[in-house]
Image (tube, rainbow, N blue to C red):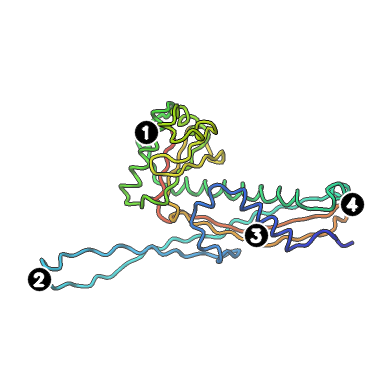
Amino acid sequence: MAIDNFIPEVWAAGVTQSFIANQVVIPTLNTQYVGNATRGNTVHIINATTPTITDYAAAGRSITAEALADTEVQLLINQEKAFSVNVDDVDRVQAAGEFNAWTEAAGRALAEDAEEYVIAQMVAGATNGNTGSVVVDTAAEAKAAVRAIRKALTEAKVPTSGRFIIVNPDMADLLLQDLSDVSVAGSSNELRDGAILRLYGMDVIESPLVAGEVPTALGYHQDMVAFVNQIDSVESLRNPTKFADIVRGLNVYGAKVVKSEAVVKYVSA
């Protein structure tokens, strides 16, 4: 029996749209390599080294060319995550024959899975900003942690534009304790919404997907974390054992920290 209401291209577009709409961290990353997202592929990212600056006059207006080296970072597209759901005939009739509900649900699930993986890769590849094993349990210590991340990024000559910081709910709660008035919070909307929009030159993102049960912050430059993904396929088939359609899809992706000094984590001891 044909699935009359299922059009793979439309359903796949719906999954992709929901996937994008539910992303929080991924839109802030380097996604220029998305076109290379194929299962088993490796994206080779070349980091050119900086040449030595020579005092030309002091060298007697003679200069020797140096050999430029480069470092290569390999982004493995090795994550393959799939979903497969039974869409019961009764549920489909009650939903007026539309698959929108399942489209949204699949997109949200794929987005959460990908973001959790990306954040884990960022934490694993980051420079440790809490080398002193500081316990962060006050608003002042939380702000000091953010300043330490800012300082580490600046000392690593990371551009000031395009900086972001991800905080888990524990760290966000401590930071919010210090937003007592507009002069500190930046605007009345931040106080009303309980939001931290920007702090010390970094756009703030709160995510419960940061692993761990202690206050954690992760600062980074948007170009220094690469992410690629492709909703590889979405298909349908009739369930042979019940009155339902099976709709399934596959998301292929990978993520990599390009320069560890441009990603700094601060985890409470």
Does residue 228 sit above or below 150 in this rendering?
A: below
Marks 4 and 2 sit apart, C-alpha to C-alpha, by: 86 Å
Provide the residue designation for mark 2. 60
Residue 144 marker: 1
Looking at the image, which residue is at 41% across and 29% down?
A: 135
Q: Is residue 8 left or right of residue 147?
A: right
Q: Earlier in the sequence, mark 3 or mark 1?
A: 1
Marks 1 and 4 sit apart, C-alpha to C-alpha, by: 59 Å
Residue 173 drawn at (x, y percent) = 50, 30
Marks 3 and 4 sit apart, C-alpha to C-alpha, by: 27 Å
> Could one spot residue 197 in this view of the protein?
yes
Residue 37 drawn at (x, y percent) = 57, 63
Which of the pair 46/155 is nearer the observer?
155
Residue 196 drawn at (x, y percent) = 48, 37
Residue 233 is drawn in which quadrant?
Answer: bottom right
Looking at the image, which residue is at 62% across and 50% down?
A: 21
Amino acid of disc 3: Ile
- The mark closer to the camera, 4 or 2, is 2
Provide the residue designation for mark 4. 243
Provide the residue designation for mark 3. 231
